[in-house]
Amino acid sequence: MTDYLGRRNKIEVKNLTRRFGDLLVLDHINFTVAEGEFLAIVGPTGCGKTTFLNCLSKLIPTSEGDIYVDGEVANPKKHNLAFVFQEPTCLPWRTVRDNVAYGMEVKHFPKDRIEKKLNDILNMVGLADTANLFPNQVSASMMQRIAVSRAFAVDPDLLMMDEPYGQLDIKLRYYLEDELIKLWQTLKSTVLFVTHNIEEAVYVAERILVLSNKPTHIKAEVLVDLPRPRSLIDPKFVEIRKQVTELIRWW
Amino acid sequence: MAYESVKVEKPLSLILLPILSVFTFFSAWELIVDTGIVPSTMLAAPSAVIKLFLIKLTDPNPDGAILAAHAWTSGKEAFIGYLLSLAFGLPLGLLMGWFTVVRGLARPIFELIRPIPPIAWIPLTIFWFGIGIEGKVFIIWLGGVVPCVINAFVGVRMTNPTLIQMARTYGASDWQIFVQLCIPSALPMVFGALQIALVCCWVNLVGAELLAADQGLGYLISMGRRLALPDMVVLGMVCVGFVGAVIGYAIERLECRLLAGIRR
Ligand SMILES: Nc1ncnc2c1ncn2[C@@H]1O[C@H](COP(=O)(O)OP(=O)(O)OP(=O)(O)O)[C@@H](O)[C@H]1O
Ligand SMILES: [Mg+2]
């Protein structure tokens, strides 16, 4: 099983369903993610994007269906899952460096591997200078970069991001999105990026899944076959953005 | 450094007014006793207390020990009881905050014992331990343990749930989350407990000594009552207050030091 670029299927989501009481939020969702793919998921507000990621990351149980990593039911203790939350999740009592190391510590990575990874990643995201500061001494965008670095540092099988840059201003967003792409290209992780910002999705993703309103299913799949770095005013970019916008508008 | 703390000037009135209020308080106290508005058999004037204080520094009569010996005895009892209450109460509270099993087992018993004032245990304590140091340490321990448990418990419960979710997605075990997230999150509350527990211990100490003791500041107060010496009663009270305030101040300084690393 491979995707259109010939990559092996890494993640398989089968019949994912979630109800809250009588409210059916996720309705039998099926899709696969290839190894090393950057997949974006867009959907209207309140359609269940966060619920979707919570199910995938095993934070909440599914009502039906499951997620498989390399053919096995996903298990945070066994697989390397990583999650970047919408709100900052830095540990205030740890320095920037130790915050980035946190996921690796939980997973008992050997000391030398942690050190090496830390040096690589902190340099790549420009956190090296602030490595010894505490989270309250850095800006909001830095906090989110810490969370992103922490996630990439564990070499995740699947990295999930829930609108990580939703609360930051536009200019900063582009900057951080570029940085994200750079991390993804260098570390070759499999990324699932949730957002309700269509332009952001088209800018970062290789493929976009468009979700419907509740009860939520996958309404369409859009390939974003554009070279990088992408330009927001490239006619092809604009065309894809419009296509996705239409898909979300018409339900 | 990305940030610097802003220094706020203390207004002059906050320096002058306390001095004024303390001065007025003691002058008024001295006056009402000296002029006989309150008879000296009911209340000792500050000057009389200071005089007795100077005498008691060296004279063991009539209560059997010099002031330093009383203070030393009380301090020792309080300190041992305090340390034991921290050693027992803080771990229990922390564990109760995170582990459902511990909470389920310990909570009902804790809630039953909590409303009983430690002083109510004094008769039983005398049966068990006599009037030696063990009994008093036990009473003091009882008083200190309650705030330790409550604060540590609440501190753990206040751990940011998103941080716990974050740790879970990395596959952290319950024990890892407890040690790496819950305990650091609870530290400010735990440090708060250090002070509250100390106050509780110190207050209970005096209670315990009023009823069963042969030395200590509480004992000094009860001897003053038995010998009808109001200056001795007041001296005992002042010493209790003063020592308590000094220890409280010391703990606060220590807390500031320790918290500098956490309250970020
Ligand atoms: N614990 C819960 N109990 C009951 N209903 C819930 C619960 N969590 C989510 N829901 C419902 O599920 C739906 C989807 O919520 P969710 O937060 O996943 O949406 P979202 O797409 O992430 O929204 P947003 O764009 O605002 O982030 C909402 O209608 C919400 O009412
Ligand atoms: Mg959401």
Image (tube, rainbow, N blue to C red):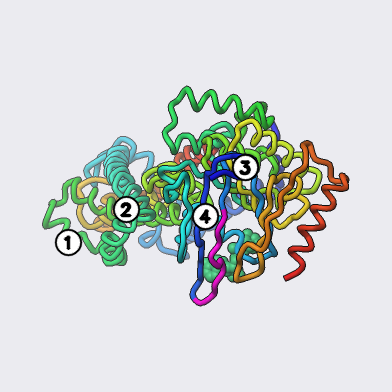
Q: Label 3 amino acid?
A: Glu
Q: Residue at x 13, y 52 (%)?
A: B130
Q: Label 4 amino acid?
A: Val
Residue B142 lies in quadrant = bottom left
Question: Is residue A23 something one can see in this rendering?
Answer: yes
Q: From mark 2 to mark 3, how far is it between C-alphas? A: 55 Å
* Badge number at residue A86: none
* Badge number at residue B123: 1
Secondary structure under the numbered disc 1 in the rendered image: helix
Query: Magenta residues: mostly which secondary structure?
Result: strand
Tell which of A30 and B1 is nearer to you. Answer: A30
Q: Is mark 1 within 8 Å of ligand 1?
A: no
* Residue B176 image point, x, y percent: 40, 43
Determine the chain carrying the residue at label 3: A
Label 4 sits on residue: A13
Q: Label 2 amino acid?
A: Val
Question: Is residue B195 something one can see in this rendering?
Answer: no
Determine the chain carrying the residue at label 4: A
Label 3 sits on residue: A37
Front position among marks 2 and 1? 2
Front position among marks 2 and 3? 3
Front position among marks 4 and 2? 4
Determine the chain carrying the residue at label 1: B
Asked if residue B45 lies left or right of residue A42, the reply is: left
Secondary structure under the numbered disc 2 in the rendered image: helix
